[in-house]
Image: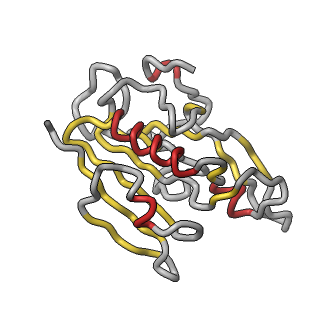
Amino acid sequence: MSVNAPSELNTSTERTAHPPLVSSDLLGFPPVLDVCCGKRAMWYDPKDSRAIFTDKRRETRQLDSRPGRSPCVINPDIQCNFTNLPFPDETFWHVVFDPPHITRQKENPAMGWITHTYGVLTGDWKEMLRAGFSECFRVLKPGGTLIFKWAECSVPLPEVLKLTPEKPMYGHRSGKQAQTHWCAFWKPNS
């Protein structure tokens, strides 16, 4: 899908209106891009109109059969892979990159709820993440920020950070076992 303007976005999900963070961009895109939105679990408002949500998956699965449990819904505005984003260079002021953290040689239909909910990195995951970082920085405006989230369930953070020439400015560990890392990057103006 080639995307030229927000009018081509999937608008089947009602969006919450918010005042713009910056003046309107000539391209008409909101200022924020989430490249692996999944079920938008980290968002305070999963329908925030200041962001475009992308993911390579579009699916609904009932992962918990107990009564009253909601299905896992992954419904991005644009279905695409984070290794090949359909946006022009330097489009967004803020990019969120929260790729799958578990690596497997191939997808397995018997995977647990975590891998169904958050996805899996298959095949050459190092090249996939390298391309993902590159794409995130390509679509990021000079002076913009990238927030990268990584859980050390399969691969330690230092090994992942070697996959980009960019260096994070600061970060934070979170989670019960302090295995989830949040890293902030800034794209210089030059």
Closer to the camera in the image, 171 or 70: 171
Among all residues in the image, which is located at the extreme bottom? 177
Horizontally, residue 118 falls left or right of residue 158, namely right
Closer to the camera in the image, 26 or 118: 118
39 lies above or below 158? above
Q: Where residue 118 sits in the image (x, y, percent)?
A: 63, 56
Can residue 139 be seen here? The reply is yes
Horizontally, residue 28 falls left or right of residue 97, namely left
Residue sitting at 59 percent across and 67 percent down? 154
Closer to the camera in the image, 76 or 11: 76
Horizontally, residue 88 falls left or right of residue 47, namely left
Residue sitting at 52 percent across and 18 percent down? 2
Closer to the camera in the image, 141 or 17: 141
Which quadrant is the C terminus positioned in?
Answer: top left
Q: Where residue 177 sits in the image (x, y, percent)?
A: 51, 82
Residue sitting at 15 percent across and 38 percent down? 189
Q: Where residue 38 sits in the image (x, y, percent)?
A: 59, 49
